[in-house]
Image (tube, rainbow, N blue to C red):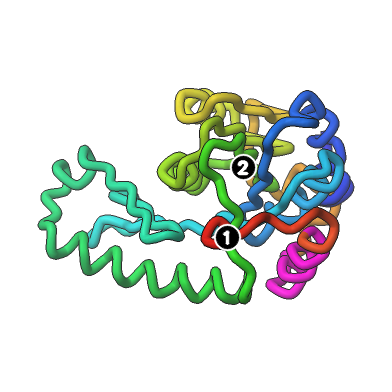
Amino acid sequence: MRFRDRREAGRLLAERLEPLRGQDVVVLGLPRGGVPVAAEVARALGVPLDVIVVRKVGVPFQQELAMAAVGEGDVVVVNDRVVGMAGVEPEELERAERRERVELESRVQRFRGDRRRIRLAGRTVVLVDDGIATGSTARAACAIARALGAARIVLAAPVCARAAARQLATDVDELVCLETPRDFGAVGQFYVDFRATEDGEVVDLLQQAARAVAPEPDPQAG
């Protein structure tokens, strides 16, 4: 199956997620490509939309191997097994975390501006991407959402590599994928239109979604 574009993929994904309607749900898109998909899901379910910005922290001599992930709210999730196996000293880990946090905070400001992060504590969180190849970013996002208090995590994508789906199933409460092909080269092969999602589009979609639902109460008010 090939999707016309991310928006069509999001509408089809929303149909599969219809059982969540009426529950205390927040939809989080992984920027940038996951946000147009997530926007359609949030719109269909009538629930809040936000981004989840995560940065993987790579082993110093092998950056593609994640030893930790950082998220908003000063959340850090460390993979102790990788840290121990790689022999990374605590000072090295701390320096690497600081570097990634600078980039994370820059991206959060770019996408969300002055809006508050939507509260996740005690809620069902639907994490949405436009497709999942290896699952490493999705896994990091799930860990961050869990650390921010999500009660239940649903990972949803129009397409996911079969091997990644098997691995991710143990990290989430529910995995929803429309397609899990055996032959998976790249996410783009499953879309007719897979043009890059620009920062401006992400910002516009988040602003539209914020206007479409009632504002979240400020937990610090009163």
Chain part drawn in magenta: 196-209
Q: Which kind of residue does numbered mark 2 sit on?
A: Leu
- The residue that appears at 78% across and 52% down in the rendered structure is 39
- The residue that appears at 11% across and 50% down in the rendered structure is 87
In which quadrant of the rendered view does residue 173 lie? top right
- The residue that appears at 79% across and 54% down in the rendered structure is 214
Label 2 sits on residue:
127
Secondary structure beneath dot 2 equals strand
Q: Which is nearer the N-term, disc 2 or disc 1?
A: 1
Viewer-closest of 44 and 6: 44
What is the quadrant of the N terminus in the image? top right
Secondary structure beneath dot 1 equals loop
157 vs 76, left or right, is: right
Label 1 sits on residue:
117
Answer above or below: position of 108 versus 212: below
Q: Residue 199: within the magenta? A: yes
154 vs 2, left or right, is: left
Q: Is residue 135 visible?
A: no
In which quadrant of the rendered view does residue 46 lie? top right
What is the quadrant of the C terminus in the image? bottom right
Do residues under tags 2 and 1 come within 8 Å of each other at their CB atoms? no
Q: Which kind of residue does numbered mark 1 sit on?
A: Arg
Viewer-closest of 77 and 49: 49
Number of numbered labels in the structure image: 2
Measure the alpha-carbon separation of dots 2 and 1. 15 Å
Residue 128: percent from left, percent from top: 66, 44
- The residue that appears at 78% across and 46% down in the rendered structure is 42
